[in-house]
Amino acid sequence: MDPFLPLGRQVHLTLIGPATHPNGPLAVPGNGDRGLEVNVIALRRLHVTGSQFALRGLAKALSSSRPDIVCIEYDPWQLQFLQAAALLAVTRSTARIVLVVKKNTFREPRSPTGRAKRAVAKWGIGKASAIVVASSMTRDMYIRDLSAPDSKIVVQPHLAIDTKRFAPHSSTVNSERIRIGFVGKIGRTKGLPELLSAFEGIERPAGVGVELWLAGNFDDAEIERRVASTSDVIYAGALNNNDLHQCLRQIDVFVMPARKLPDHEEHDGRAVLEAMASGLPCVVSDSGILPELVSPREGRVFQAGSVSQLRSCLQELVDDAPLRREMGERSRQRTLVTVSPDVLAASRAAIFEKTIGGTALNSRNSDEVGYTARGEYLAQDVVENYIPNRFSGRLGRYRFQREQRAVNDLIAQVPANDVDEILDCPTGIGRWLPNLATLEPRRIVAMDVSPTMLEQARTVALPGVAVDYREGVAEQLPFEDRSVDLVFCHALLKHLPESAQEQVIKELARVASKNVIVTASVLRGPAGALRRVRRAKGAVAVSRGSFEATVARSGLRVVDSRKAATPVGVEYSYLLRKL
């Protein structure tokens, strides 16, 4: 239930589902969360066949909730989707359907039943206003096999991961023993025969033991016997989700060697994402969604079924502790900016906004649905091109001078004796650190999601000021309430969906004890055309009234503002103060 909670702060949310579920009963979340609006309607499941079921009382539940959007997390050929879509059609509901899917293969039996399945799926796709797919492979399948319009489809993570529970272990890793871990169904589909063979071929470093930990249920008696007879293979049991995070904190490398089958490839990736959130380097096969989750920065991808490639990937990580640590840190950061509940809720809310507005989901002239700009920001070559791309030429030099003047004017209004600790997030290459150091703080925390940016920021000389460099994101600041005297946030908000901008401002306000300096793209006056130009350039501008209302709701007030030059002139730096 937890992953739904942040979305309940963005929209009026009603969850409708079966009263019983393998992960536990459908229940109302705690009411202690301020701003949370989540209603739960648990219905009786009417089993039909296989995984197909209907919900008794669904018509009444839909009618009573009076939705603007109905988000259905079942493929359009499944009975669960058809029941909801048919009820909305029969009752002439004006609610828009958002289809959320992850299946990346479409099996069509050569029979009248198979043809009917395709026809039903196409009918369902026609009823959907938007299709949120978990991977590019799913998108391609829907377009290729089911003729889904590309304009309806957006690729977005399917799962929100509890990044507070699934987090790196704080204790020192045991350097005398390396543990490779797998979580899932222990059988052939998940590639366990290949994993066991690859593990047996790993060369053990001198003085270091290597173990393979397996957690899950066996579905193959032969594999169960092989596990029992293989040395250094530890069976951790069939863990429930409440205990899984503890298991992940005890391993050093996570592996998911899933096979490719004609009618199935990995489409979920939950175990991999939970491992990444736990700060683990991941070795995965190229089955389905897996290579979209893990890049060479966070782990290794091998050809499904190849024992030699899998053994080589594992051997590399067994032999290189610094590489394991570096990949684990990057895995953690990737989950924070893509699948943490707050981030995913903001991205999903942005899709809802666009669906209500009738805007094409993949239009380049509309608000960013996800964090595409941030994904580009994490690229290795961003640092070397950052200054040339932003501040080269006459216009670039003018922009640089105007930004410096605007920010310096606001910094000058912050009493130096009020500043003991400053947070600069995102710090980027550290170009604002010297400006902030003029306030003579005891400490500056320079935080950024990009390890490459932080590496460059460390080269900025700040005599007499202690600087703490940390990886992190503005949506989830690791600070207590009112613990930082000045929070500085430049050039971030414009890269986020409008719903995410409010979330960030509230988080800045939460940790600030006195002052916040933030830069945003804010429209003033009749600027409809300006807004369209701004969006085309990849920035998300908001109205002045909307921005100031967000500031007030966050417990801040506007003290002063300065205009910073941009090609369309809507960039403003604000000095905000706690109420």
Image: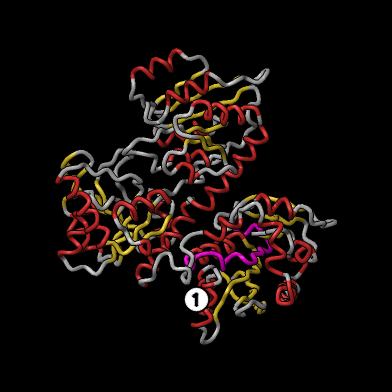
Which residue is at 21% across, 67% downward? 93
Q: Nearer the viewer, residue 139 or 184?
A: 139
| Whether residue 25 is visible | yes
Q: Quadrant of residue 154?
A: bottom left
Can you identify the residue that label 1 sits on?
A: 546
**Percent x, y of residue 253:** 55, 32
Residue sitting at 41 percent across and 62 percent down? 349
Is residue 219 shown left or right of residue 135? left
Residue 568 image offset from top left, x and y in percent: 60, 79
Where is residue 557 drawn, in percent x and y? 59, 74
Q: Residue at x 31, y 58 (%)?
A: 148
Q: How many marks?
A: 1
- On screen, residue 150 above or below 265: below
Q: Which region shows up in magenta?
A: 481-499
Kind of residue indicated by mark 1: Ser
Q: Nearer the viewer, residue 90 or 123?
A: 123
**Which residue of the protein is positioned furthest toward the front in this rendering?**
110
